[in-house]
Image: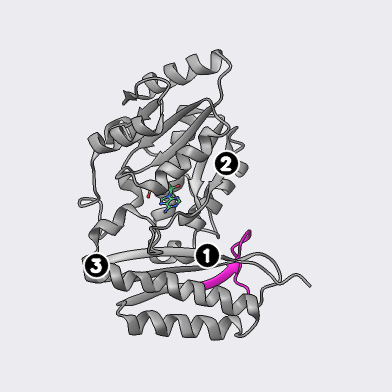
Amino acid sequence: MPSAPLKIVRTVKDLRQQVGEWKQQGLKVGLVPTMGALHHGHISLVKRLQEDCDRIVVSIFVNPKQFGPNEDLDKYPRQERQDADKLTEAGVELLYAPTVDEMYPDGFLTTVSITRMTEILCGANRPGHFDGVTTVVAKLLLQCLPDRAIFGEKDFQQLAVLKKLVKDLDIPVEVVSGTLIRDEDGLATSSRNVYLSPEERQTALEIHKSLSRIVTDLQAGTRTVSEAITAGEKHLLEAGFNEVQYLEVRDAETLELVDSIERPARVLVAAVLGKTRLIDNMAIEPAYR
Ligand code: AMP
C-alpha cells in the first residue's frame, strides 16, 4: 500500500519545497527520471530505489532537446493519467511533470555536453541526442537534488554517460544502475514497442536471440568477436530488419571496442525495423581461468 497519495508538481519551486521538507525530516530521497508511457522496466527502477530511499520522485518529461528533427517527438506516447495510476500503485510519493516552458524558459542558452563517449554507438546515429540527455538530466538532478538517482541498463551508453556527467560536474547525487527488464518473450521492454505491428514484434524477438547467441559464442570461445558480430548482423538483416545501425562488443566500463573478452564486456545493438529503431544490450563475462 502506498504511504501517501501521489502528489503531482509541475514547477521547480514546488519540487524543491517538497524535497526540502523531506530532507529536513532526515528522509532519503530517490529520483527516477523518465519520459513517461511507463512500463514494468520503469517500475523496476522505482522498486530498486525504494530499497534504500524513503521517498521516491518520478519525473516525466518528454525532452524535445534529445529528439532529432526527423525523430518521433510528436508521436511519442503521452499518457500521464495512466502513468499516475501506475505510480500510485507502486507507492511513489511525488510525480514531477514540468512543462517544456518550465524546463526551457525563453532565453535558455545552456548545453551540457560530454565528448568522446557520446560520439560512438547511439551518438554516431543520433547527432545532438546526448547533449539533450545530459542537459536535461543535469537540470533534473540540480532541480531535485535527490540523494540517489537511478537509470536503466536498457540504455547502457546513456547510463555510462550520466555516471560521467555526475562525476565530472561533482553533482552530489549517487547514481544507481537498474537491470534491463524484458517482456516474457525476451523483447527489451520499451515505451517505443507500441509502434511495432504484431508481425514486427515477432521479428523484433530476433534481437534477443542474436545477442544471446553472441554472448554464448564469446563466453564459450567458439567464435571470435568479429565472427560473432558478422553472423549476428547477417541474422538480423535476414530476419527482416531494414538496417543494423551498430552491433558492437565493447568494454562494459570504458565503452572502448574490444576484440577479445578479457574483462566484463557488453554487446550492444541498434537496429531499425519498419519505422521503429530498437536498442538492446547484454553482458558478456570473461572466462575465469
Ligand atoms: P525512458 O522513459 O525510456 O527515457 O526511460 C527512463 C529510464 O527507464 C531510463 O533510465 C531507462 O534506461 C529506463 N528503462 C527503460 N526501459 C527499461 C527496461 N526495459 N529495463 C530497465 N530500465 C529501463
Residue 111 visible = no
Residues at marks 2 and 3, CA–CA distance in whole angstroms? 33 Å
Identified by mark 2, the residue type is: Val
Could you classify mark 3 by the number of other residues whose Cα lies within 10 Å: few (under 14), some (14-19), or many (20 or more)? few
Q: Residue at x 49, y 46 (%)?
A: 151
Q: Is residue 163 above or below residue 14?
A: below
User: Residue 204, position in %: x, y?
Assistant: 33, 70
Tell me the quarter of the picture where residue 128 sits: bottom left
The nearer-to-camera label among 2 and 1 is 1
Identified by mark 3, the residue type is: Lys
The residue to which callout 3 is attached is 275
Q: Are marks 2 and 3 in contact (CB under 8 Å)?
A: no
User: Residue 16, position in %: x, y?
Assistant: 44, 21
The residue to which callout 2 is attached is 175
Quadrant location of the C terminus in the rendered image: bottom right
Label located before the other in sequence (1 or 3): 3
The residue to which callout 1 is attached is 282
Q: Residue at x 40, y 60 (%)?
A: 188
- Magenta residues, as a range? 248-259
Residue 98 visible = yes
Q: Determine whether the residue tagged by mark 2 lies in a helix, strand or loop.
A: strand
